[in-house]
Amino acid sequence: MESPDSLSAKPLEPPRQVLDAPRRLLVVRLDRIGDVALSTAVLRAARRAWPQSYIGVLVREACRDVVTGNPDVNAVLAYDKEGKHRSPLATVAFARSLRPHRFDTALVLHPSNRAHWIPFLAGIRRRVGYDRKQPWLLTHRVPHTKQEGQKHESEYAVEMLRVFGVQPGPPEPFVAVQPEAAARVTQRLQAAGVPAGATFVAVHPSASCVSKRWMPERFAAVADKLAAPGLRIVLVAGKEDKPHADAVARAMRSPSVNLAGQLSIAELIAVLARAKLLISNDSGPVHLAAAVGTKVVVIFGRNQAGLSPKRWGPVGQGHVILHKEVGCEVCLAHNCDIAFKCLTELSVEEVHSAALAALAA
């Protein structure tokens, strides 16, 4: 099915107390690249509402490139949860290092213990977030209902601004392409036989869980059907997911350019911005591609409200979502006892047809 052209779920009820506009705002999102990409919609809405405010964004070190170069942001602050800030003492020191920014308000878009502790330890006076994961660290709490999947994730994010009396419009995620990364990508693609201006389709065959991964041999079959002298196939994946891309490359009869495990996030963004189309499982690159204006064909597996296309589909027009309903009342995720029927019932022909439609749109 095609993704909706607009997101029009019922808005949150107005808060009982409307907060004053922040002068120095810190937006906090400490999860993965796709989540951060969708949350850039908040940065755009906040900048429109408060053009004179100082806006900082706090993300994990691994997600820094998703917000670098964003024109709506004054400061990008990176928390290295898996590295130098991993220990409790290092987290305290990091939080205190934020104090010179003099943030008066923190907006925590995804609840986690650390995401709540850091603004508290940083001495930020107003701390707005969801009512879970040690919510007593917050000064203003919003009910957490994301698991019900009644809205898109980007909608949940921008509607947090209602506590300040802001009536946000449709979410508009935005990710900047860094010129240096784009230049490196151009050189790498040229070296692989894809000159500047050449048309290619990017394929991302991985995802965070086996219950979200369509079969590599089927990705390969779709890629072979699309491959032509004027249309190349470029495989992308992170270092830990390189085996999935390698399996696609081995199964293909046509030549491909396999960049799996070779790209930084900034370089991945540049590749996706140049691609004519991305074909992918439900994963972070879907939202990066949509945020740079590239059409996406995305494959969804699991049948859970909180993980549904309604909540996690790509934002924008021209995207195609493929999701098979196979009658599961309860999704067992990676413990599936029907051999991931939601994925195996999706045919090569269906994905190929979706790709052709997206390319022609």
Image (cartoon, grey):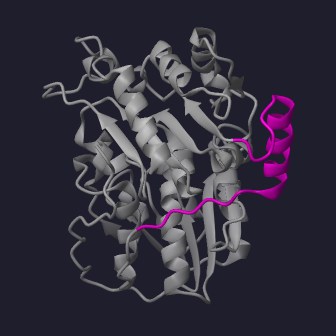
Camera-nearest residue between 140 and 210: 210
Magenta residues span: 171-198
For residue 223, above or below residue 28: above
Residue 19 horizontal/vertical position (percent): 39, 85
Give the percent coordinates (x, y) of residue 214.
42, 22
| Residue plotted at (42% across, 53% down) | 318
Q: Is residue 31 above or below residue 137?
A: above
Q: Is residue 138 left or right of residue 255?
A: left
Residue for point 84% across, 36% down = 190
Please indicate, yes or no, whether residue 278 appears anywhere in the rendered image: yes
Residue 31 shows in this picture: no
Quick check: 179 left or right of 323? right
* Image mark count: 0
Q: Position of residue 36 (x, y in %)?
A: 54, 53
Where residue 185 appears, as percent x and y from the top left, is 79, 42
Q: Who's the residue at 51% across and 52% down the image? A: 290
Identify the residue shown where x is 33% and y is 53%. 132
114 part of magenta stretch: no
Q: Is residue 46 left or right of residue 74?
A: left
The question of residue 181 being in magenta is answered with yes
Answer left or right for 41 relative to 185: left
Outermost residue, front side: 229
Give whichever of 344, 175 is nearer the camera.
Answer: 344
Q: Is 96 placed above or below 192 here?
A: below
Q: Quadrant of the N terminus?
A: top left
Q: Nearer the viewer, residue 205 or 131?
A: 205
